[in-house]
Structures are given as C-alpha cells and as structure tokens.
Image (spheres, helix red, strand yellow):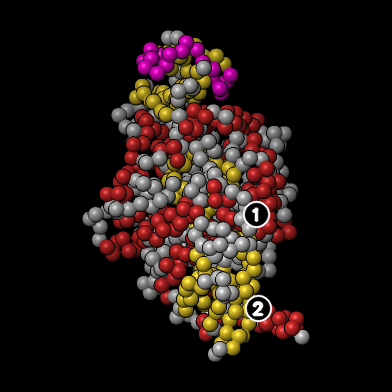
Amino acid sequence: MKRLLLLLLASSAFAQLSKVEPPFWYAGMQNPQLQIMFYGKNIGQYNVTAPANIPVTSVIRTENPNYLFVTINTAGLSPSDVLFSFSLKGKQAFTRTYELRARKEGSRMRKGYDSADVMYLLMPDRFANGNPANDNTTDTAEKADRTINNGRHGGDLQGIIEHLDYIQQTGATAIWSTPLCEDNDPRGSYHGYAESDVYRIDPRYGTNDDYLTLSSELHKRGMKLVLDYVTNHWGAEHWMIKDLPTYDWIHQFPGYAQSNYRMTTQFDPNRAESDKRYCVDGWFVKSMPDLNQSNSLVVTYLTQNAIWWIEYADLDGFRVDTYSYNDKEGIAKWTKAITDEYPYFNIVGEVWMHDQAQMAYWQKDSRIGAIDNYNSYLPSVMDFTLHDAIGSVFNEDQPSWDRGIVKVYENFTNDFLYPNINNILVFAENHDTQRFNHLYGNDIRKYKLAMALIGTIRGIPQLYYGSEIGMAGNKDKGDGDIRRDFPGGWPGDTQNAFTRAGRTADQNAYFDFTSRLFNWRKTTSVIHHGKTKHFLPENNVYVYFRYDDSHLVMVVLNNHPDRQTIKTDRFREILNASKGRDILTEQTVDLSSQITIEGKTPMIIEIR
C-alpha cells in the first residue's frame, strides 16, 4: 500500500512539474547556495519544503504562477537525493526528488586553456556529418537541406569525434565549437546563437551523452573543450520566452527594440543615457530577445547553467558571445561567480571593438575600467584590432607611415593597456568575418605570413576550420558562404580533405605549413610565456623576438613582394648568436652579418 501511495505521489509530481532546472546539481560547490526553478501549471500556488537538514533560504514567486524559484543551502551535504515536498492548504500534494551528484575529483582547480594552447574554431553543422540519422528530428522545426546556404546541413557531434585525429594533426590543442544547445528557429538555426533550451544539446547534433563523449575523447588526447556561451540573448523559440517568468526577464520597450550596437556607450562619459539603453537593452536581432542581467533571477539562472555545463561536460573554458552588449554590472557578477568557483578556468569574451583601450576596458583588473570603477572579471578578450590589421596589411606591398606591416607593429605598441597580454585571443578570421583566403585570393604566401604571425606572438592563437586547407568564402554572399561544408565531411562527397590522399597538392601545402608551425609551437614554451622585443619595420620587413632567460626565437616577416637583405647588427641588443635554425624549412641560418629572405615570406629562427 505504501509503495502504491509513493507511485501515485510521483505520478502527481510529474504531471504537475514540466521542468526542473538545473535538472540536478553537485555537492561540495564553493558557493553552497542553489536556486532551483520549478516550472509547471500553477506551481506557484504550492508551498515547498525540504528535509530539516537542508535550509530553504528563499522561495520566490513571480507574477507568472507557473514558476517557483527555491533556494537551498547545500553546505556540508554529501551526494544524495533531496526530497522536496509540495503542499496546498496544509496538505501534501506531491513530492519531487532532486539529485545532488558527486563532483569530479579536483574539479574546482581545473586548468583552462591558456597561451600554450591553439584553439580550433569550427561550426558543427558545417564540419562533418557522422550520423545522418539525426539530420532531422520530430521535435525541431528546420530540416536539413545542403542546397540552402543558410540552412541546416547535417554536421554533428559524431562528425567532430570521428575527425579529432585530423584536428590534432593541425597542431590545435583545444576545440571551440559554436553553440551546440538546441536552437529551434524555423530558419537559420544552424549557427546556434538563438538557443531554445540551454540544458539540451540540439538533437540534430546528437545527445547530451554525445557531448560528454566528445569531451572525454578530447581529454584522452590531452586536448581541451571550449563551450560557446551566450549570455546576452536567447532565441524567440526558447520555452521560457514563450512563458516569461517575469515581465523584466527580457528587456522590453515594451517588446522588441533594435540595439544600436554602439558598445562605446558602456563607458563614454559624454553619452546620452538613451543611447546606452538602446545598445545594452536593445535586441541583437528581432529573433533574439535580450536577456536582462539586471534581474537577479536571470543572473543566477545563467550562472548556474554555465557552472552546470562545466561540471557535467568537464569543460576547459568558455568563449562568450556578444560579451560587451550585456548589462555590464550583471555580466561582471556572472563572470566573477564562475571564476570564484573555478580560479583557473578561462573565459574569453567577444568584445568586437576597434580600439585597444576600449577592448582592454573589458579585461579583468583593467586600469582603464578602474577609471570607471568597473571590473568585468573577464580573464580574456579577443584581439580585434590585430584582426583588423591582418585583414589588409598583406596586400599593402609598398610601405608608408601608416600602411604595410607597420600596422601590425603599431598594434603591439599598445600592449601596455592590457592587464594580462598573454591571455588574449589572436586570430586572422572567425565565423563572423571575411574568410582570410577570400580576402587574399588564396595566395598561400600571405596565409603563411598571417599564420606565422599569430603563431609566434603573445596570446592564444585561434584557427578557423578549413583555412588550413585553403578554404575560402565571401561574406558578401551571406554568412553561409564563410561557413561552407568541410569537403569529405558528408557521405557521398567527391573529395575527402580530411586525408592526405584526398587533398589536392595545394591543399596539402596549406595543411603541411599549418601543421609544422603549430605542432612546433606546442612544445616551445618561450612562445607561450616569453617576452617580446620588436624593431620598427624597414622596407615592409618586420623583425621581432620572443625570449626568456634561456630561449630566443627570431621572427622575420617580409611583407615586401621582393627579396630583402637585412643587416643583423641592428638587433645586437638581443641577438648574440651567429646562427640559428628556421623551423619552417629546417635550414641553418647564418646570423653573423645579414639575412636574405624571399618576398612575402616568413622565417621563424630558433636560436640556441
């Protein structure tokens, strides 16, 4: 009889509760406070209690009766099941068991990615289709159609897992995948930035368990997994957007208003407050409602979701989309809560600005932010000013005061603005920009110059999938064109560029250079943590050194179309050797008096 009663109570609970988030949690967290969201028809009318040894510190009911936000104190609790009791008018109506799991040993002290890593950015829908059976699912709207440039193409987690050896061969040590959580937009859902369920992997990519498999397989190889996290907005199809917990869960004007995208209003002392509001509170696009990080329930929900993924999937870092569009106080609370829980976890924020001071404002402990009494607590930002220079400099053959390779030199003269210059992401392109090989007409000489640059300077290099085989794409034709399918990733593809035999001679030339450079970088600590000394470019030739107490690397980038001869006595304040080895050609280089270097060519010279 007792068993029957328990079954009836459990049945009632599942009928009453549609969702519980986080779906489970972990014992032994640094912050013992856990906010659990119970969602179901009129759930707010119930009183909720926990066992006597588990303090309920807060119960919040909102204007929407379908939500209850219950906070408990988990301090001192062991992994166990917590039984919540829901009562109405003094009588128990149903119960719900909530699981506290054990954390992985050493989870808090996990080490994130850093300047010893090389990050490989891929779009899962466009990389490889390892499981065609999940291309379409009954509970997602958009169906796969490779003939549509901005449609679903069917790439998935299994496709990534099957090609980890290939990614590792490039020299990459970490994978940053664009978002993998469910995006149920009727069109354009392949990019994943309009999430509709942030606790569920999109079924067209696979399952949550498939994501765990990817994480495990990467860690077996000594590689890292970076999750692309979106704090600024969700998709209009998110189930909570369709039944808002509170009116101010999202920014409302009422309803939609477009962001002006002017991120400078976040710190401009002369700004109009209305301009700041439309930047921060305006929606990124109409199909992406803007989350309100000024609402403490929202910040806690996002924080716990982020921490849940770190624990659940054993993550090594985040890349945060549209970081500088968030309410800056709210996003600082989110970032600090995560880094307080994981002091060595790394988070890079997308701060797409075109001025080093403005970007440095957003890095943790910035002296520029301190002027504004602001600290984002964000460990890393993306070096968009370097990206801007890379996008034009290799076509500027004849140098002038502000054209040619001097643009790159000038970028590094502002490194003093960043509180942690080694912890910034450096890149030639990403999934939102023009493809490098399109900009430069698949001139492999210019690709080599760009890769030699980001592979030897301070920071964390990021590669964009396919460029290592010469893939191009024109953003002017739409984002889908810069996010093309990787050749060989689909059954029936006429070419398989994942293998040497399947690549053309030109593709192998790209790949071999990339692999040689970044595999060398993996074991070269002076590039990871050393200092930089650079010399003013002469005749479009840029020379800089990476050095520490026991290692020296000389980098020569000849951006001039013609062969150049460089006198080495100019560098004697740091160069005290007569020879070195060019790691790109394996040739010995005589440094005693001069170096001759071909046009549009890099040299990376190890000096022992």
Badge 2, how many Cα within 10 Å: few under 14, some, many 20+? some
- From the viewer's side, name the closer residue of 547 and 444: 547
* Residue 418 versus residue 261 in the image, above or below: above
Q: Which residue is mark 2?
A: 14
- From the viewer's side, name the closer residue of 426 and 488: 426
- From the viewer's side, name the closer residue of 207 and 547: 547
Task: Provide the secondary structure element on which disc 1 rests.
Answer: helix
* Residue 461 versus residue 306 in the image, above or below: above
Q: CA distance from mark 1 to mark 2?
A: 27 Å
* x 65%, y 45%: residue: 218
Badge 1, how many Cα within 10 Å: few under 14, some, many 20+? some
Which residue, as the protein is rendered here, is positioned at the far bottom? 89
Does the magenta-highlighted stretch encompass residue 570?
yes
| CB contact under 8 Å: marks 1 and 2 | no
- Horizontal arrangement in the rendering, residue 487 relative to residue 475 (left or right): right
- Horizontal arrangement in the rendering, residue 401 relative to residue 64 (left or right): left
Q: Nearer the viewer, mark 1 or mark 2?
A: 2
The stretch of residues the image draws in magenta is 568-586
* x 64%, y 32%: residue: 508
Q: Is residue 603 visible?
A: no
* Residue 57 versus residue 470 in the image, above or below: below
Residue 211 is tagged as 1
- From the viewer's side, name the closer residue of 583 and 470: 583
User: Residue 246: horizontal and vertical position, in percent?
Assistant: 44, 75
The amino acid type of the residue labelled 1 equals Tyr
User: Residue 189: horizontal and vertical position, in percent?
Assistant: 57, 61
